[in-house]
Image (spheres, rainbow, N blue to C red):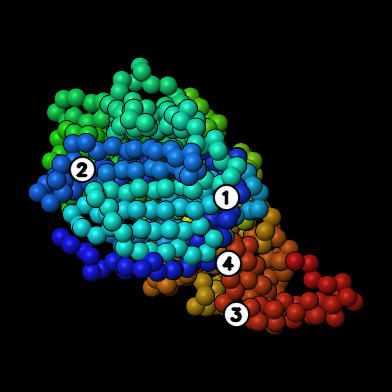
Amino acid sequence: MSADADVTTAPQPHSFQAETRQLLKLMIHSMYSNKEIFLRELISNASDACEKLRFLAVQSPEQLGDVSDLKVTLAIDKDARTLTIADNGVGMNEQDVRDNLGTIARSGTRQFLTQLSGDQKKDSQLIGQFGVGFYSAFIVADKVEVLTRKAGEDAAVRWVSDGEGEFTVAAAEKAERGTEITLHLREDEAEFLEPSRIEHIVRRYSDHIGLPIRLDGETINQARALWTRPKSELKDEDYQQFYQHIAHDWEAPTAWAHHKVEGTLEYTSLLFIPKRAPMDLWDRDHARGLQLYVKRVFILDRAAELLPSYLRFVRGLVDSADLPLNVSREMLQGNRTAEKLKSALTKRVLDLLDDLAKNRPEDYAEFWKSFGAVLKEGIVEDQANQARLAGLLRFTSTTSGDACSVTLADYVARMPSGQTSIYFHSADSLAAARNSPHLEGFRKKGYEVLLLTDRIDEWVTAHMTEFEGRKLVSVAAAAADVEGVIETADKAKQDEDFADTLSKLQQALERRIASARLSSRLTESPSCLVAADHGVSRRLEAMLRQAGESVPTSLPILEVNAAHPLVERLKGCADTEDFADLAELLLGQAVLAEGGQLNDPARFVKSLNSLLLGRAAQGGGSGLIL
C-alpha cells in the first residue's frame, strides 16, 4: 500500500506543546546524573517496534514479508559526532510520527508537571516513573533525526528537532521498513562515541532484550528473553533491570515472582510489585495490565484481562503456551484458558504479597501506603479470594498511634473477654476518626476500634461483614451500644426520667431525626448521630450525594449523654423557650463533631447566640458552658 500522497514533500515546522517544552528542559537537567539511560529507552522502543511487527506478521504475513531477522543495530560516527539506533520493526508513517513524537504522554503531561517539587532528586525519580522514552535522547543530543518507514507502506518520513520548541516533518527516502534515530551528541558527550562505553550500557540495561543488538557487526547482548532463562542463572540485578525496561520505572521493584508452570495449564510468568504508585493509578480509563506473549511471540502490551482490577498496580508479563497466536483482547474475554490463567496469576500475586507481609513487614508497610486502598477493592470485587485479602489488610486503630499496621488477626488476638465484635469507625481523616464522640464509650471499656479513612472503606465494610466468625460493627451504627458503661439499674432510671424530654426533643427536631434516645456510648460529649440499623452509613450517604447519586433520605438517630450539663439543662427547661435552641445546639454539635455540614448554619448560629445572650443576661455575663 502506498502512502506517498499523505507525506509532505518539504520540511514543515511544528511547535511542541508548552508542557512538552517544559518537560524536555526539566528532563535534561534533572536526569543528567544518570544520562546513560537514554540508550536503554531507545533500545527498548526499538525492541517494542520489532515485537509489534512480529505480532502483525502473524495476521498479515503476505503484506509484511520476512520477519525472521529482526534486530537492533547501533552505529557510531566519530567524525560526525553521531550515534544511531536503528531497527527493522514496524516503523511509522507521517500520522504516527505526528502522534507519537509531537507530544509527550498526551493524557498525563499536565498532571505530571503539577507534581514536580523543585527537588532535583525527587523530580528525577518522578520523571523516571513517568517514562521518558524517546525524549531521553535530548539528555545527550542537541539535535535528533528520525528516519522511518512503516511496514507495508512505500513512503518514508524524516522528523528533526533540537528539542527547544519546534520540530519538522518531511518526506524522505528509505529502502527498508523500520526506524533510524540519529543523535547529534553535545560537545561534552564524547563518551557515547566509544564502542566500549556503548557495549557496557547495553549489557547493563538491555542484555535481556530478546533480539540481537549489534554494534560493528557483532551481537553484544545475550539476545534471549529473560523469563525463558532458568532462575538459577539470574541475579537480583537482572530482574531489577528487566523491570525498569518493561515498566519504565526509575526505581527497582519492591518484590517479584518468576514461575514456570507445566501441566494442564502451561505458562511462564514474571510479576513485579512496584515501589511507588504510578500517577495514573486512579485513572480507570488508562490502559494497564501485563504484557502477553504466546510461545514467546509478543501479543498485547497491556492485557488488563489477565489480572483483576484491584491488582492493576502489578507489572510484568506472562508467556502462555495455551492461547492461540491470533488471540485478541476480545478473545480473552470469556475465554476459558484466559480465565484459568487469570485465576492462577491472581494466586501468584497474593502469594507474593503474603510472603512480603510475613517476611519483610517494613517493605510491606511501604507497599500498603502506596497500594493499600487499591488492594481493598478486592474485598468488594473478588469474593473467592476475600479471606486471603482480609489477611493482607492493614489498619490504624485507637491503640496503634498513627501507624497503619494492625491486622484483623492482631485485633482479634487482643480482644478482651466479653467483647464479641470487631469495632470500626469511618471518617474523612484520622484526626476526625480519633476524636469522634462515637469512640468514647468503647475507649472507656478498653475496646480497640479500627479507624478507617479511605473512601473505599465504606464499601469494604459493607461487603466484608465478619472475620473469623466475629462481626464487623460500626461504632456509629445504632446497634453498636456499649453495654456496661452505665449500670443497668441506673440506665433504667435514666430512661424513665428522660422519657418526656426525649419525646419533646424528637418533636422539636421533627423531620430531621428519626428518633432521640439516651446514649450508652457517650461519656464526654453531649450528643452524637448514629445510623439506623441496616441503613446506609452517614459517611457513605454523604459521599454518594457528593458524587451526584440519588440517595433516599435516611434520618439519623440523635443520641444524648444524660450526664452532660447541656443535656441536664435541656431536661430542666423542657417548658421554656430555651428548649428549642438547646435542641438545635445538640443536633448541630453532633453534625459538626462527625465532620458533617449544617443544613442551615444561620439557624444554628441564631440558636447559639440566643442561648449565650440569654445566659449572659441572667448570670451577669457568665456565658453558657458548651
Separation of disc 3 and disc 1 at Cα?
55 Å
Q: Residue at x 59, y 74 (%)?
A: 598
**Which mark, residue 28?**
1
Question: Which residue is most to the left?
Answer: 62
Contact (CB < 8 A) between labels 3 and 1? Answer: no
Mark in front: 4 vs 1? 1
Q: Residue at x 34, y 20 (%)?
A: 231
Q: Which amino acid type is shown beneath numbered disc 2?
A: Arg
Mark in front: 3 vs 1? 1
Residue 251 visible in the picture:
no
In the structure shown, which secondary structural element does the residue marked by tag 4 occupy? loop
Q: Provide the residue designation for mark 3.
A: 600
Tell me if 73 is positioned left or right of 3 in this view: right
- Judge the density around disc 1: few (<14), some (14-19), many (≥20) Cα neighbours within 10 Å: some
Q: Provide the residue designation for mark 4.
A: 596
Whichever of callouts 3 and 1 sits on the residue coming sooner in the sequence is: 1
Q: Which amino acid type is shown beneath numbered disc 3?
A: Asp
